[in-house]
């Protein structure tokens, strides 16, 4: 499942990049940060990115999950930090859904 | 109420075609005869003066005739369009004592057993003036019943005006539809009635009967463009198109002007609560307009348009008065001002607040409509845990575009045209129509 989630994240980044300028484009890599002082996107970019992921998960996996919720913010380490943490978080949410 | 001004106009224009309906032409002489029969009909039924009467009808000779007879009898009239399938609630709210249904082939008359209690309705009776109850077309909650002293609304028709051959696009129970009908009778004009209001029907009738005026909505103009109706039918007879009822996307306005450069495009502004205001568009492709005069005063406070009108309603039957102590009505329309001109940005209730940034749906809709493959679009706010609201767009597409790649294309299109917070975060694709019976976006 992790592989499919990573594919979805890659596709979400590609789709987000469609609306970003060349100097703002997000790279799919382990060093890419989505929040914090080294975040590669602004708050609107983040909101759009999350929304695309949710839509792709619904399209490809037939599951409706909400990534931004109270639980996500109450965790000690933000699940939105990197591709890796995001993939783990999505996997947990999907497993909870099952 | 004395309706001699209508009667004299009908007699003066006795040979003029007043109504074309289902291919049949009716002169004012025929309307006049039907009016006389309606007067007798009301006498026979023993409908007392000042009765509250719901009238379910479309623009037919019979409805015009009956309407005139009811006005003369100082009735309080509640027009109901046949598109309203369940008129029961409307009859109840308006305290209608009688229900006339002439929308079908037979005339149905029912005494409802309702008793008029509302002081506003009693006031009209005491003053022996006809009334008009119009329901606001809000999509949420209960429709609000606006009560008018009809004698005030009809005052302007005593002054002669010009008429154009007009298609009755707006419905019988709409302030704009009512206005068109009264103007036509008062000035010896011709109206052409519609059955389905489809772009094909409207445009074929424009060609067939050399219609000069199409009063319509931005959604319908977009349909004319999308279906390339101007290639299928000769629309060169059109002199004017008026648009109102919802904000106009600039892209649609520019596109129709390019296709039909000789047609005057005029924005209208009317509300069930205050009547139809005089307007003057700056130019065909401009959303700036002059508004007011002739009994209408305007003022703008914090970007919101307020109107004070001689022909304003008395109030709502089922909601608190929206007027302040000095009689000003808050339209809830946010506007920009440029000298004598104003531009309507949208209803404050439709405004989307994205983390403090304000977005008016029509601006985003206008941009999206320019993107190839977007057939129609509805932009709205969606709740979001981080931003409060985010912009969402529902887009009508053809089947071949009903896929994720199309959304990518739209995102790319928005990139250089809209600020980040205005670009829809959520997209929903559909192959269904986004408008309702009144060719107005479902909001």
Image (cartoon, rainbow, N blue to C red):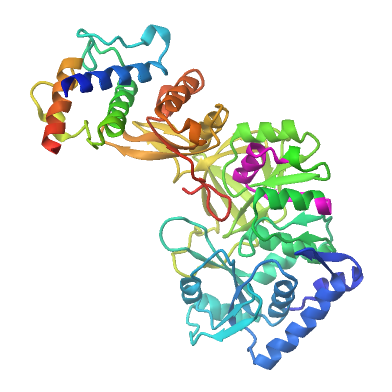
Query: Can residue B82 be seen in the rendering of this structure?
Result: yes
- B99 versus B386 height, above or below: below
Image point (53%, 48%), residue name: B435
Residue B132 lies in the magenta stretch: no
Image point (48%, 31%), residue name: B401
Residue B212 lies in the magenta stretch: yes
Image x and y of residue B36, in percent: 79, 83
Image x and y of residue B352, in percent: 41, 37
Tell which of B295 and B412 is nearer to you: B412
Query: Can residue B283 be seen in the rendering of this structure?
Result: no
Image x and y of residue B160, in percent: 84, 61
- B9 versus B289 height, above or below: below
Q: Quadrant of residue B300?
A: top right
Q: Quadrant of residue B33?
A: bottom right
Image point (83%, 45%), residue name: B237
Tell which of B276 and B105 is nearer to you: B105
Relative placement, left or right, of B111 versus A70 is right
What's the magenta region? B208-229
Image x and y of residue B95, in percent: 50, 78
């Amino acid at each position: 499942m992790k592989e499919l989630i990573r594919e979805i994240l890659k596709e979400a980044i590609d789709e987000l990049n469609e609306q970003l300028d060349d100097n703002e484009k997000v790279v799919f890599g382990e060093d890419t940060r989505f929040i914090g002082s080294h975040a590669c996107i602004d708050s609107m970019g983040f909101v759009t990115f999350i929304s695309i992921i949710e839509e792709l998960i619904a399209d490809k996996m037939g599951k409706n999950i909400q990534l931004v919720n109270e639980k996500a913010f109450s965790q000690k380490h933000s699940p939105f930090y990197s591709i890796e943490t995001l993939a783990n978080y999505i996997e947990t949410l999907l497993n909870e859904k099952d | 109420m004395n309706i001699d001004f209508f009667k004299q106009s009908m007699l003066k224009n006795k040979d003029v075609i007043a109504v074309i309906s289902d291919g049949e032409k009716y002169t004012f002489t025929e309307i006049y005869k039907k009016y006389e029969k309606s007067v007798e009909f009301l006498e026979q039924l023993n409908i007392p003066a000042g009765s509250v009467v719901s009238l379910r009808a479309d623009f037919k000779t019979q409805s015009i005739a009956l309407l005139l007879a009811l006005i003369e009898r100082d009735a309080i009239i509640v027009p109901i369009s046949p598109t309203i399938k369940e008129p029961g609630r409307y009859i109840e709210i308006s305290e209608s004592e009688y229900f006339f249904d002439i929308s079908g082939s037979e005339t149905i008359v029912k005494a409802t057993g309702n008793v008029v209690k509302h002081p506003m309705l009693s006031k009209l009776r005491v003053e022996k003036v006809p009334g008009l109850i119009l329901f606001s077309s809000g999509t949420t909650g209960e429709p609000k019943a606006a009560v008018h002293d009809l004698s005030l609304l009809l005052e302007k028709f005593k002054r002669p005006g010009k008429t154009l051959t007009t298609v009755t696009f707006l419905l019988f129970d709409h302030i704009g539809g009512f206005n068109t009908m009264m103007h036509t009778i008062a000035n010896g004009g011709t109206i052409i009635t519609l059955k389905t209001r489809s772009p094909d029907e409207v445009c074929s009738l424009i060609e067939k009967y050399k219609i000069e005026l199409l009063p319509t909505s931005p959604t319908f103009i977009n349909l004319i463009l999308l279906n390339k109706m101007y290639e299928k039918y000769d629309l060169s007879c059109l002199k004017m198109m008026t648009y109102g009822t919802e904000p106009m996307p600039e892209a649609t306005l520019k596109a129709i002007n390019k296709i039909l450069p000789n047609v005057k495009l005029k924005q209208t502004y009317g509300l069930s609560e205050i009547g139809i205001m005089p307007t003057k568009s700056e130019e065909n492709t401009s959303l700036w307009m002059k508004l007011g005069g002739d009994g209408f005063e305007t003022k703008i406070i914090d970007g919101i348009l307020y109107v004070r009108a001689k022909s304003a309603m008395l109030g709502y039957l089922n909601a608190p008065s929206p007027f302040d102590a000095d009689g000003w009505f808050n339209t809830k329309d946010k506007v920009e001002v440029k000298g004598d001109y104003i531009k309507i940005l949208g209803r404050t209730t439709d405004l989307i607040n994205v983390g403090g940034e304000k977005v008016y749906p029509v601006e985003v809709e206008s941009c999206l409509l320019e993107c190839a493959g977007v057939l129609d679009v509805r932009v709205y706010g969606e709740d979001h845990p981080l931003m409060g609201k985010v912009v969402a767009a529902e887009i009508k597409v053809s089947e071949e575009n009903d896929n994720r790649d199309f959304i990518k294309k739209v995102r790319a299109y928005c990139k250089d045209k809209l600020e980040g917070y205005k670009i829809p975060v959520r997209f929903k694709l559909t192959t269904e129509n986004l408008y309702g019976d009144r060719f107005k976006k479902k909001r």
